[in-house]
Amino acid sequence: MAKLSNNKILERGKYLSLFAIIFLLIISTSTAEYLESYKGDLEYKELLNGKGQTWQLNFTPMNDINQIISSIVYFDFSYVPTTHITFLITMQVNKQFCKPESWKLGGDNGESITPYSSKTIKFDCSNIINRKGIYDIIVTSEQPIKGVSGSYEINYYSHPVWQKSIENIEEVTKKPVMQVFGTEYIIGDNATAFLQLQSGGQPVNNAECFLRIYYPNKSVFVNNTPMTYIGNSAGIYYYDFTIPSIYGVYIYDASCWYQVGGTLDKVATNYNLLIGDLTGGTYSDTNFYDSVFHRHKEIGTPARLDLIYNFSTINLPFLGGVITLNVTTSYRWNDNLENLDLYLFNYNNSTWVKLDTSLDYSTSTKTVMNYITFENNPENYISSSTNGNMALRITDSVPSDSSIKEFYFDYLNIKISY
């Protein structure tokens, strides 16, 4: 059978062809950004010895958020300082520590001994308050506080989320590109129209695509029907239909919408114990910051501990551009002679890449964060061939240490910003 060109009309009674229109729909997003500030007050309360007070921060701006710049919480304390006594003020947001984790107040910090002293302290909660939502704040004090009031300021960039444009394919070599495909069919056949959507050479898997097909007389046969994404494919969307009984050349076009930028929060979905003894809990105990621990003890001579926590279904819309990882760990580790090092697995060369900040000695729960930015080849650390997996390894840094110590793991989270 000879393949017909776009401008031929097929012989009546034999075949039907589908052709893409001569230009393609290209999707782009607005680059306009606006710096916004969201402020509010936290009501006046009292703090009793060792007791906490709670506030609720409702971060619900009307416009869309592109990027959080800073999330700062301030508290003003009115208290009676006592000579040679200092005490800690701690604050948590959604059961996670801000920076710093605590402040010291009291006579040993140089405050003058007056009937009432006041102090304003600042917590940087940008690592936690990073999207719209309602946040629970808990403040605790080792000494009674006469009065506490607070405020917050969240600075962020906003911009319009969706913007559609139609451009000629030759003018958009560095912009998202959609290729539309079809073939020849006999009347009554089951047909499939499909397309592949890419951005910067990488597949876009989170789009909403719509198809329009025209009869030979240019009237509409299929009008803006949603197309279906093929799971785990490289940005391929399709629509199935039955070939109608009107002969001729059918033209079709497609349009796609997708959002650029977002954040994924991931917790461990399983783990592997390579070296060590399990002394309590399960890997799912690391999914929440709640003082319920996944516990392991070193074994052997020298004493060793080696764990791998796995993360799955990390389905980014595409892997181009800059991707930032924030790896948060909350733990206790009672070995003051060695640290526990953290590694991410590189799927490209099958090596473990060490993160900058290790887990050092701490008999109380401590939170450590590692920030990693990938400008090139972020897919090395997110395996697309295994449904979007990542792997984090925790192992002792001085294997020659012979003392047996125990690791208490409370919370593990990987935040992926793209």
Image (cartoon, rainbow, N blue to C red):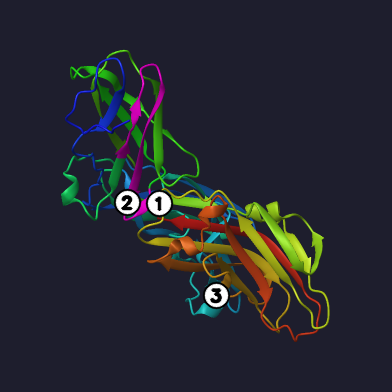
- Looking at the rendered structure, the secondary structure element under dot 3 is loop
Magenta extent: 180-203
In front: 410, or 356? 356
According to the picture, the residue beneath numbered tag 3 turns out to be 357
Count of numbered tags: 3
Q: Looking at the picture, which amino acid does disc 3 mark?
A: Thr
Q: Position of residue 288 (x, y in %)?
A: 63, 52
Q: Looking at the picture, which amino acid does disc 2 mark?
A: Ser
Do the numbered discs 3 and 2 sit on residues whose CB atoms are within 8 Å?
A: no
Circle 3 crowding by C-alpha within 10 Å: few under 14, some 14–19, many from 20: some
Q: Position of residue 278 (x, y in %)?
A: 80, 63
Do the numbered discs 1 and 2 sit on residues whose CB atoms are within 8 Å?
A: yes
Q: Residue at x 29, y 28 (%)?
A: 18
According to the picture, the residue beneath numbered tag 1 turns out to be 318
Q: Is residue 189 magenta?
A: yes
SS majority, magenta: strand
- Give the residue at the far front of this rendering: 1
Examine the rendered structure and indicate whether residue 402 appears above or below residue 345.
below
Circle 2 crowding by C-alpha within 10 Å: few under 14, some 14–19, many from 20: many
CA distance for labels 3 and 2? 33 Å
CA distance for labels 1 and 2? 7 Å
According to the picture, the residue beneath numbered tag 2 turns out to be 199
- Tell me: 173 left or right of 299: left
Whichever of callouts 3 and 2 sits on the residue coming sooner in the sequence is 2
- Looking at the rendered structure, the secondary structure element under dot 2 is strand
- Tell me: 109 left or right of 292: left
CA distance for labels 3 and 1? 28 Å
